[in-house]
Amino acid sequence: MPFPKENSYTTDYIYSLPEGQRAELIDGIVYDMAPPSRLHQELVMNLSAEIRAHIKKNNGSCKVYPAPFAVFLNMDDKTYVEPDISVICDKSKLDDRGCNGAPDWIIEIASPSTKRTDYGVKLFKYRSAGVREYWIVNPLTKTVNVYDLEKEELSDQYSFDDNIQVCIYDNLSINIAELLK
């Protein structure tokens, strides 16, 4: 995992990074981001498409944004994240810079370099910011941890072969293995 830079930074630092260099900012600590793998990108693309198709089919108003997409989680200058997938149902949170506040559903694709942050730091931040649902998709273990943060239930873990019920949509379940065929 890229080590966090331990000084207190603001979003001004994130916006001053050279073109192509990506990082996240959580409580003033910068976390450098490694380039994603091909499988990571395939998962982001297919999951985003599946969610978007469901929303359109049901005449929903939520929007799906794959990374890079700015989320100013605490609406301050100390926390800026780029979830792999953000689903936002409250359009008043959206502006030209990204999302101001908590998305309704966040999906992170875990990698060896992001595992500690995804399962620890981000889980805490997303829960405390008001994210309703959080998925951690782990391609190495072929598992998905689903956190129903709205109901404050502990996570359930699924395999890629399972039909995973989405918490914020009663009529949507996703089978990751089917998406990768």
Image (tube, rainbow, N blue to C red):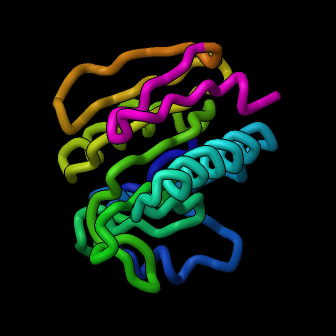
Residue 181 can be seen, yes or no: yes
Residue at (60% x, 37% y) in the render: 113
Image quarter in which the C terminus is found: top right
Q: Is residue 21 left or right of residue 144?
A: right
Image quarter in which the N terminus is found: top right
Residue at (53% x, 62% y) in the render: 65
Q: Is residue 155 above or below residue 71?
A: above
Residue 48 placement (x, y as % from top left)? 61, 50
Q: Is residue 33 above or below residue 138?
A: below
Residue 8 can be seen, yes or no: no
Residue 173 placement (x, y as % from top left)? 50, 29
Residue at (34% x, 33% y) in the render: 167
Q: Is residue 174 magenta?
A: yes
Residue 155 placement (x, y as % from top left)? 32, 21
Magenta stretch, overall SS: loop
Task: Find the residue positioned furthest to the front.
Answer: 58
**Residue sitting nearer the eye, 33 or 167:** 167
Residue at (55% x, 52% y) in the render: 57
**Residue sitting nearer the eye, 110 or 55:** 55
Residue 60 placement (x, y as % from top left)? 42, 59
**Residue sitting nearer the eye, 9 or 133:** 133
Q: Which residues are magenta?
A: 162-181
Q: Quadrant of residue 9?
A: bottom left
**Residue sitting nearer the eye, 77 or 71:** 71
Q: Is residue 127 magenta?
A: no
Please give the count of numbered marks on the rendered protein.
Answer: 0
Q: Is residue 79 left or right of residue 35?
A: left
Q: Is residue 21 above or below residue 112?
A: below
